[in-house]
Image (cartoon, rainbow, N blue to C red):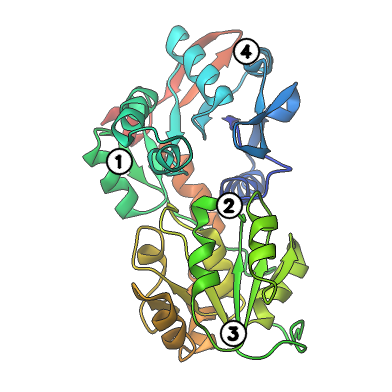
Amino acid sequence: MRLLLATDAWSPQVNGVVRTWQQTIRELEEMGHSVDVVHPALGRTMAAPRYNEIRLALAPWRIVGAAFDRGCDAVHIATEGPIGFETRRRCERAGIPYTTSYHTQFPEYMKRYFALPMGVTWRFMRWFHGGARATLAPTEQVTRQLRDHGIARAQTWCRGVDTTLFRPSDAALFAHLPRPVHLYAGRVAREKNIDAFMQAQLPGSKVVVGDGPERARLERAHPDVYFAGYRFGEELAAHYASADVFVFPSRTDTFGVVMLEANACGLPIAAYPVTGPIDVVREGVNGALDEHLETACVRALQVSRAACLTHAQSQSWRRVAEVLLSHVVETDVARGGARTLLSTRSARG
């Protein structure tokens, strides 16, 4: 099968959406499928308002049109940006079945960044995802949230971790820092609530792995915190393995792939009991959840690193790819036309 994946989030962006799709595509290709990724860098771009590291397509109709000309067997729309919007428009106009996924809490972010009432954004989300044969959400809780807001065909997807890359090691990157080492990894952006981590009264040291629009401000305000910048692959895994607790302060993530990566390196998680962490963290097994981040960190330090590893090993990217395939609608798409070949259970339902 040849899948057309329409996404406004792609390399060189570094985030959970990109990482999820890169790993899923790798599994799909190993299963004998091919994926045509339609993304902004295929044409001219502009910076997203208030988020310069995110590039948006200036002429999405050209990029998407070229992809439709190449043809495909199924269409999946991963994001609600210009690429996703144009792909949806073409599918609706030509009667091409498609699926979508929900990765980002846009209503929360639009309120935080632009003071847009969440009700307005949810109306847009219902419109955007309403025509999809299935909208894939990362967890049961997010699936329920979408259905509660009128996105009736929401289905639970899942997330995985590469345990060959992310694994325990004898790395000792923080030998110069007082223990315990509390580590955050991810985008350094306002919606990640990193200020809560910075302000938490914790023993030992704090490390931030990643970059983003908030990094300069946080570095000025917290000179005692070690900012490592972006790290990838083996280097990122070594940072996880060298720390004592992984701190995930976000209250708005739909999942948080970094939590599974940390667990796969034997690192327990400390987080708030909110959407995302509550679907990943089992109290006392692979981390701790508490409304007081300091309390969660103290309890997480008592969690067995071996138990964290065992938990992570049960989460595979192959399963992520298989669930995706079970929902996509196979169709014959070329030059704006379509012929449906096979509908999934979701499409028939």
Residue in the image at 58% along x and 81% along y: 266
Q: Earlier in the sequence, mark 3 or mark 1?
A: 1
The vertical placement of 192 against 303, above or below, is: above
What's the residue type where badge 1 is placed? Leu
Residue highlighted by disc 2:
189
Q: Which residue position is annotated with label 3?
A: 244
Q: Are marks 3 and 1 in contact (CB under 8 Å)?
A: no
Q: CA distance from mark 4 to mark 1?
A: 28 Å
Q: Secondary structure at mark 3?
A: loop
Q: Quadrant of the C terminus?
A: top left
Q: Position of residue 346 (x, y in %)?
A: 32, 34
Residue 133 seen in the current view: no
- Dot 4 or dot 2: first in sequence order is 4
Residue 162 horizontal/vertical position (percent)? 62, 64
Comparing labels 3 and 4, the label whose residue is closer to the camera:
3
Rendered residue at 40%/36% (across/down): 115
- The residue at which mark 4 appears reads as 61
Q: Which mark is residue 146?
A: 1
Question: Residue type at mark 2?
Answer: Ala
For the residues carrying marks 4 and 2, which lies nearer the camera in this image?
2
Q: Given the current orientation, which residue lies at the most extreme front position?
A: 221
Identified at 47% across, 8% down, the residue is 94
Q: Earlier in the sequence, mark 3 or mark 2?
A: 2
> Would you say 199 lies left or right of 32 here?
left
Q: Residue at x 65, y 47 (%)?
A: 22
296 left or right, relative to 345:
right
Label 1: which secondary element: helix
